[in-house]
Image (tube, rainbow, N blue to C red):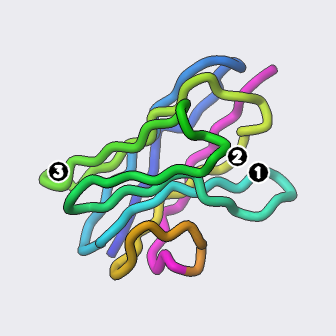
Amino acid sequence: VQLQACGGGLVPAGGSLTLSCALSGRARSVGWFRQAPGKEREFVAGIGWLGGARWYADAVKGRFIMTRDAAKNMAWLEMRFLKPEETAVYYCAADQDGFGDRMERDYEFWGQGTQVTVSS
């Protein structure tokens, strides 16, 4: 299983950005995580690959939307009303057997990450 995240960049506070994740291989779920400088990596959003059910971290609920196109092996994270404290490297990851997971250890495969910088 391989994943490749892209779409990061510099965006002003309150702005929007959409990240993309290309998946090759099998996954039951795909998730987005982020790691800010000096902080631990944290869960952002997840999606069931077959049914499309989604779950979000409370901090992003209502502002971020995760979608996927299983036929195209693609997932996206639309981020709106971004805050400076959301500056981080964003990663997509695949969970081969789990659903609804929010822990880093539950995701077996990881992409390389894409930098998102939110300016104040």
- Residue displayed at 34% across by 81% down: 97
The quarter of the picture where residue 26 lies is bottom left
- Residue displayed at 39% across by 52% down: 54
Residue range highlighted in magenta? 106-120
Q: Residue furthest right?
A: 38
Instruction: Check residue 88 in the rendering and tell me which mark sits there, or answer none.
Output: 2
Along the line of sight, which residue is nearer the eye, 96 or 113?
96
Q: Quick check: is 116 in the magenta stretch?
A: yes
Q: How many marks?
A: 3
Is residue 56 depicted above or below 82 in this figure? below
The quarter of the picture where residue 41 lies is bottom right
Which kind of residue does numbered mark 1 sit on?
Answer: Ala
Q: CA distance from mark 1 to mark 2?
A: 4 Å
Circle 1 sits in a helix, a strand or a loop, which is it? loop
Q: Is residue 70 left or right of residue 9?
A: left
Which kind of residue does numbered mark 2 sit on?
Answer: Ala
- Residue placed under numbered mark 3 in the picture: 72
Which kind of residue does numbered mark 3 sit on?
Answer: Lys
Quarter of the picture holding the C terminus: top right
- Residue displayed at 67% across by 60% down: 42
Indicate which disc, 2 or 3, sits on the residue closer to the N terminus: 3
Is residue 63 depicted above or below 94 in this figure? above
- Residue placed under numbered mark 1 in the picture: 36
Where residue 11 sits: x, y (%)? Answer: 64, 23
Indicate which disc, 1 or 2, sits on the residue closer to the N terminus: 1
- Residue displayed at 77% across by 30% down: 84
Q: Residues within 10 Å of mark 1 (few under 14, many from 20)?
A: some
Indicate which disc, 3 or 1, sits on the residue closer to the N terminus: 1
Q: Quick check: is 1 in the magenta stretch?
A: no
Q: Is residue 2 left or right of residue 44?
A: left
Q: CA distance from mark 3 to mark 1?
A: 30 Å
Along the line of sight, which residue is nearer the eye, 113 or 50?
50
